[in-house]
């Protein structure tokens, strides 16, 4: 990775040596630091302002109860907080990486602003999944709860390169704790947050 | 402050596209406001530091479930102790690091993980000073990444940790390769400005 600096920033002929060294040091810091962790959906909202004593391993469920009391804005409000896309309609971006037989696939999901009916439009981009052999050989995006497949967000087939699909779901995301993609005929994830 | 008092800022945040009202304040100014009971400031601190605190907890505890619990405890500790913050003694980010680290360590002591077996060989990994230095470095870097514009943050994550080449990133994001390189350089320069102290 350290040798990728030139590839990542392109031709540096126009940079003075001091600036080049500065950028390279940042590059090395990024490599040293490693990736920041993905934050589960149910932790995107801060804890209650009133500090509360919660039971170990169950405090997120208690927080969910507190959140449920915020009747006027509970639905999805915390979800809005994380996104700061330059596209103002994107309220949150989710990254996914391959697991199991997913090979070297990656995906991103851009959640858009809720529509007037209460649906959450989203655009999913996938790269690196095995190509679908037919229309029946589809992949499926799921929301998970407690490590189990909970609700489907839609199905799609994959061809070469990057596959982009538009999906829309009515669910309140705070009820879930992650996203996975499965391939037809299996409940084993090939992509996961 | 009451729980119901959270409704108004949440609604305001939703109305302005999910952006919090205090993006321009420094971490220290936010901590001072949290000390005065400002819920909006707390929410903005949470947005900035969720991933650094979770990363610190994961590094320390090594278990996802315990780390997620520790994240909640750490921010509860921030809320409780923010009034003790003294800006003359250090930056807000460093103060928050100390509070979060102490909350994580205290939580781990209260609920120690059962030890299955004592290893036969001494651990030859990094010692406590090196681990502490690495944790602080990750904290700073992850905090800085949190404030990158979304299009630059995604690009950096794909390029550095998604295992994609720049051409693949360009294809994935559906932007020209030159744009990817320009944005990468811009993101690195932005990070360099923020991480100035780490670069010496």
Image (tube, rainbow, N blue to C red):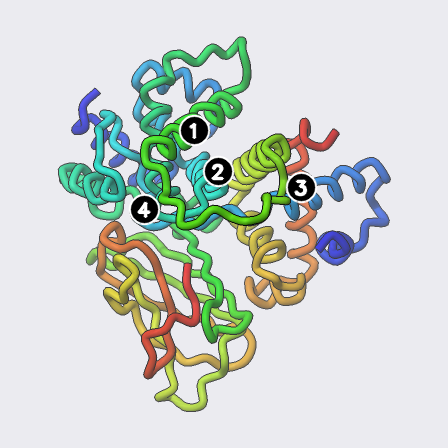
Q: Report which residue position mark 3 lands on.
A: A29
Q: Report which residue position mark 1 lands on.
A: B100
How crowded pointer 3 is (Cα within 10 Å; few <14, some 14-19, many 20+) is rated as: many
Q: Report which residue position mark 2 lands on.
A: B56
Q: CA separation, marks 1 and 4?
A: 23 Å
User: Which marked residue is nearer to the observer: mark 1 or mark 4?
Assistant: 1
Pointers 1 and 4 in contact (CB under 8 A)?
A: no
For label 4, the SS is helix
Horizontal arrangement in the rendering, residue A74 relative to residue B129 (left or right): left
For label 1, the SS is helix
Q: Residue at x 67, y 41 (%)?
A: A29
Horizontal arrangement in the rendering, residue A14 relative to residue B106 (left or right): right
User: Which marked residue is nearer to the observer: mark 2 or mark 3?
Assistant: 2
Query: Residue A65 lies in what quarter of the image?
Result: top left
Disc 1: host chain: B
Q: Position of residue A152 (x, y in %)?
A: 27, 69
User: Which marked residue is nearer to the observer: mark 1 or mark 3?
Assistant: 1
């Amino acid at each position: 990775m350290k040798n990728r600096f030139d590839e990542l920033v392109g031709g540096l002929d126009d940079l003075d040596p001091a600036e080049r060294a500065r950028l390279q040091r940042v590059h090395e810091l990024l490599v040293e630091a490693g990736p920041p962790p993905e934050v589960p959906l149910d932790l995107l909202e801060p804890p209650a302002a009133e500090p509360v004593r919660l039971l170990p391993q169950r405090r997120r469920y208690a927080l969910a109860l507190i959140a449920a009391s915020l009747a006027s804005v509970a639905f999805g409000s915390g979800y809005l907080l994380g996104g700061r896309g330059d596209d103002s309609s994107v309220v949150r971006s989710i990254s996914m990486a391959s697991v199991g037989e997913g090979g070297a696939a990656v995906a991103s999901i851009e959640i858009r602003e809720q529509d007037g009916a209460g649906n959450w439009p989203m655009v999913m981009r996938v790269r690196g999944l095995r190509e679908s052999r037919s229309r029946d050989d589809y992949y499926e995006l799921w929301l998970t709860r407690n490590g189990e497949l909970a609700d489907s967000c839609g199905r799609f087939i994959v061809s070469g390169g990057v596959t982009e699909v538009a999906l829309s779901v009515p669910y309140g995301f705070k009820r879930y704790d992650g996203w996975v993609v499965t391939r037809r005929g299996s409940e084993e994830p090939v992509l996961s947050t | 402050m009451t729980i119901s008092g959270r409704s108004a800022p949440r609604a305001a945040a939703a109305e302005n596209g999910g952006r919090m009202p205090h993006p321009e304040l420094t971490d220290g100014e936010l901590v001072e406001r949290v000390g005065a009971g400002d819920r909006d400031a707390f929410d903005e601190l949470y947005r900035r530091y969720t991933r650094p605190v979770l990363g610190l907890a994961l590094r320390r505890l090594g278990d996802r479930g315990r780390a997620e619990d520790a994240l909640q405890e750490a921010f509860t500790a921030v809320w409780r102790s923010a009034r003790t913050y003294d800006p003359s003694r250090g930056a807000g980010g460093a103060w928050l690091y100390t509070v979060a680290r102490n909350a994580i360590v205290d939580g781990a002591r209260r609920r120690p993980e059962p030890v299955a077996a004592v290893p036969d060989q001494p651990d030859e990994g990094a010692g406590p000073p090196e681990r502490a230095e690495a944790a602080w470095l990750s904290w700073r870097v992850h905090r800085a990444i949190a404030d990158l514009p979304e299009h630059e943050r995604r690009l950096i994550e794909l390029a550095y940790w998604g295992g994609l080449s720049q051409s693949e990133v360009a294809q994935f994001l559906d932007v020209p390769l030159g744009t990817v390189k320009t944005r990468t350089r811009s993101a690195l320069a932005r990070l360099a400005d923020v991480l100035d102290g780490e670069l010496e």
